Image (spheres, rainbow, N blue to C red):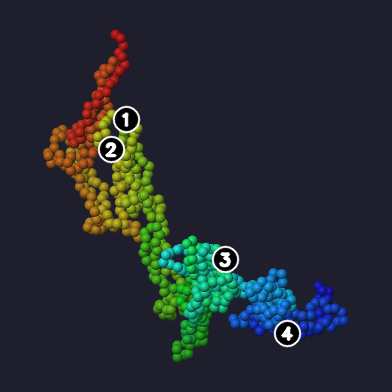
């Protein structure tokens, strides 16, 4: 390494010092300046005797025009092959971008009018690279030769792309007899890399509005590149499509519109980078909270409009998710002791004797829903406590050194109770058509049996069933009521879980029959109740709060005939038993209970069906008078002992 260092020193010692920088090749738009040095040795010196740097890196005024175009137009008064032409620049030559090639206006004639352009001419229209001494040199966005630093999509040199957002979308035309034009998209001031492609028979055009409110329009009638409000627009028109490109940044708001020109539909795809024009800006420190004896002061953040250079409402900055509001900074201030006349305020730690302002909140409100997800809210304010312990509200910015507590939160996010149907019971008959039952429970999110399910959505607990075995009994009074315990269990569950968030009549269980034999009565309480959603408790209401018919609170009951008494009833008792209460009519019925023995042991005989009055719940034989309201079934006979008798 020491030998290498000495060789470099020896090499540099053969050169004289660098001379001063030359005048810049351009006055604006980026030019080049050079510096020279002399070789002091009689031998050849290693290295270059000239070096370059960029200069005049300020934008040219719009009326200055393109630098390459200026060089072409300088030949307008020089005859070429005996004729004068108006020369236009030919840019972006991939083979030799630093030669001056120009095209005669109105012709296909392209001529190289100079082997190299002036220093500082851009190699390509969309690049900062510049031609120096006929060679294209790399230039970064920092305007340094040889720099690889580039602008991000937002136009910020060496940026991270956080100051703009990508906008892409598609528009489809909707033809209407009363509508000839429509808006495709509005592209705001400062947007970059705009590209739109229209496919179809319709035509694009532009409406422009400057920041000063001046409006204009451009019909985009021909293919070409032109300036619109100092923004370079490149437009290409083809038979079946149109392409619009604007590199930007836009110097006005551009509204791209479509003019309907055919019966077929058109589509427009667009993409551009939109600047985030509202950004947070940190403020200076607010005034100190105390004039002496030690206080505190905070910074805040305000939303700033980069276009109008003024402060706007915070909601404009919240619109952009990329915007992160800076946290306030806190510092102590006015630490000098207070004058004796003020009682001398001793400086104490803030957390013991002079606590910082803090957020205080009210209790959460009741949840807006008892289940399935609701919201609850509270109010949050900034308060300050003095040395005496008195608490008073203060401005919110004083508490911004810590995040503000949330004012809304979700609640009761568990699932609402729902009906759960158990398996069906066996069919209530062994032949023909009967009924089957199931238990339906209201289950909460923990799997517990509860209330609160809607009675309107409750699955049915009873349905008909058919046993594919033929019956001898005529099907006059089917379906038959269920046997215990299925019917009793399903009925009790049905009556006991009907309470809901709407006031409704809730009957309790029936009392036991008032007599042990004969006809008595049963009582039960019927309440008007409602389910309180927040506490999940049941409250009693006045009877008139419930709508609809009130369930009966008294009914007749029959406990069977009293021993030693004739089963005769007065007309009133008969009416009570069989007329107004249909449940007795459904409780007792005639049924076939097998057959008598065959009248013959062989050679053919008959059997008669035995008809009895049965209690359909207990399956016990009852007095036949209890079945008088049902029609006695017809006599059934069947053949039996059909085998021939043995010979005597």
Residue at horizontal 66 percent and vertical 71 percent from the top: 108
Q: CA distance from mark 4 to mark 1?
A: 119 Å
Q: CA distance from mark 2 to mark 3?
A: 81 Å
Q: Are marks 1 and 2 in contact (CB under 8 Å)?
A: no
Instruction: Give the residue at mark 3.
Output: 238
Crowd rating for badge 3 (residues with CA inside 10 Å; few <14, some 14–19, many 20+): few
Q: Are marks 2 and 3 in contact (CB under 8 Å)?
A: no
Q: Earlier in the sequence, mark 4 or mark 3?
A: 4
Marker disc for residue 470: 1
Q: Secondary structure at mark 4?
A: loop
Q: Is residue 570 above or below residue 63?
A: above
Instruction: Give the residue at mark 2.
Output: 479
- Between residue 142 and residue 336, name the one nearer to us: 142
Q: Earlier in the sequence, mark 1 or mark 2?
A: 1
Q: Earlier in the sequence, mark 2 or mark 3?
A: 3
Q: Is residue 489 above or below residue 61?
A: above
Q: Earlier in the sequence, mark 4 or mark 1?
A: 4
Marker disc for residue 21: 4
Q: CA distance from mark 3 to mark 1?
A: 84 Å
Crowd rating for badge 1 (residues with CA inside 10 Å; few <14, some 14–19, many 20+): few
Crowd rating for badge 4 (residues with CA inside 10 Å; few <14, some 14–19, many 20+): some
228 vs 419, left or right, is right
Q: Taking the image as drawn, is residue 99 in sight?
A: no
Q: Secondary structure at mark 2?
A: loop
Q: Farthest residue in the top direction?
A: 648
Q: Is residue 467 above or below residue 29?
A: above
Q: CA distance from mark 4 to mark 3?
A: 51 Å
- Between residue 126 and residue 302, name the one nearer to us: 126
């Amino acid at each position: 390494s020491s030998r290498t260092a000495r060789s470099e020193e020896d090499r540099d010692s053969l050169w004289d010092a660098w001379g001063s920088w030359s005048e810049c090749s351009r006055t604006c738009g980026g030019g080049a300046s050079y510096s020279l040095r002399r070789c002091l040795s009689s031998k050849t010196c290693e290295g270059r005797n000239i070096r370059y740097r960029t200069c005049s890196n300020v934008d040219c005024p719009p009326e200055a025009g393109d630098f390459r175009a200026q060089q072409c137009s300088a030949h307008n008064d020089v005859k070429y092959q005996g004729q004068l032409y108006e020369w236009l620049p030919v840019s972006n030559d991939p083979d030799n971008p630093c030669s001056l090639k120009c095209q005669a206006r109105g012709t296909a004639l392209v001529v190289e009018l100079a082997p190299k352009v002036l220093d500082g001419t851009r190699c390509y229209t969309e690049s900062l690279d510049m031609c120096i001494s006929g060679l294209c040199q790399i230039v970064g966005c920092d305007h340094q030769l040889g720099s690889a630093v580039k602008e991000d999509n937002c136009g910020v040199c060496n940026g991270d792309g956080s100051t703009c957002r990508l906008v892409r979308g598609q528009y489809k035309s909707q033809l209407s007899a009363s509508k000839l034009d429509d808006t495709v998209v509005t592209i705001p001031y400062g947007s970059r890399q705009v590209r739109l492609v229209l496919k179809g028979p319709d035509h694009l055009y532009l409406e422009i509005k400057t920041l000063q409110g001046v409006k204009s329009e451009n019909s985009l009638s021909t293919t070409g590149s032109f300036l619109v409000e100092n923004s370079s627009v490149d437009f290409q028109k083809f038979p079946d499509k149109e392409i619009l490109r604007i590199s930007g940044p836009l110097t006005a708001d551009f509204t791209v519109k479509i003019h309907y020109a055919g019966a077929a539909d058109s589509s427009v795809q667009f993409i551009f980078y939109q600047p985030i024009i509202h950004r947070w800006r940190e403020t200076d420190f607010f005034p100190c909270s105390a004039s002496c004896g030690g206080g505190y002061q905070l910074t805040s953040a305000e939303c700033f409009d980069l276009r109008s250079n003024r402060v706007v409402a915070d909601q404009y900055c919240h619109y952009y998710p990329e915007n992160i509001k800076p946290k306030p900074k806190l510092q102590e201030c006015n630490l000098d002791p207070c004058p004796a006349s003020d009682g001398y305020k001793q400086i104490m730690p803030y957390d013991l004797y002079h606590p910082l302002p803090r957020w205080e909140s009210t209790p959460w409100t009741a949840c807006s829903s008892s289940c399935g997800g609701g919201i609850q809210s509270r109010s949050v304010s900034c308060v300050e406590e003095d040395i005496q312990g008195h608490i008073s509200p203060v401005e919110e910015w004083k508490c911004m050194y810590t995040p503000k507590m949330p004012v809304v939160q979700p609640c009761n996010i568990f699932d609402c109770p729902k009906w759960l149907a158990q398996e069906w019971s066996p069919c209530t008959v062994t032949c023909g058509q009967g009924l089957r039952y199931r238990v339906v429970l209201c289950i909460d999110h923990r799997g517990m049996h509860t209330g609160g399910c809607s009675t309107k959505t409750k699955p049915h607990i009873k349905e008909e069933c058919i046993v594919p075995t033929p019956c001898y009994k005529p099907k006059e009074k089917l379906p038959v009521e269920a046997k215990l315990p299925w019917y009793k269990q399903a009925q009790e569950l049905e009556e006991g879980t009907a309470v809901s968030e709407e006031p409704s009549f809730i009957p309790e269980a029936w009392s036991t029959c008032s007599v042990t034999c004969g006809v008595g009565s049963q009582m039960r309480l019927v309440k008007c109740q409602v389910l309180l959603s927040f506490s999940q408790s049941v409250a009693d209401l006045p009877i008139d709060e419930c709508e609809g018919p009130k369930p009966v609170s008294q009914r007749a009951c029959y406990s069977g005939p009293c021993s030693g008494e004739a089963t005769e009833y007065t007309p009133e008792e008969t009416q009570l038993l069989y007329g107004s209460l249909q449940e007795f009519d459904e409780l007792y019925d005639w049924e076939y209970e097998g057959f008598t023995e065959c009248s013959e042991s062989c050679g053919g005989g008959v059997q008669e069906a035995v008809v009895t009055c049965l209690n359909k719940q207990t399956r016990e034989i009852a007095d036949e008078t209890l079945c008088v309201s049902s029609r006695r079934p017809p006599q059934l006979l069947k053949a039996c002992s059909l085998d021939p008798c043995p010979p005597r």
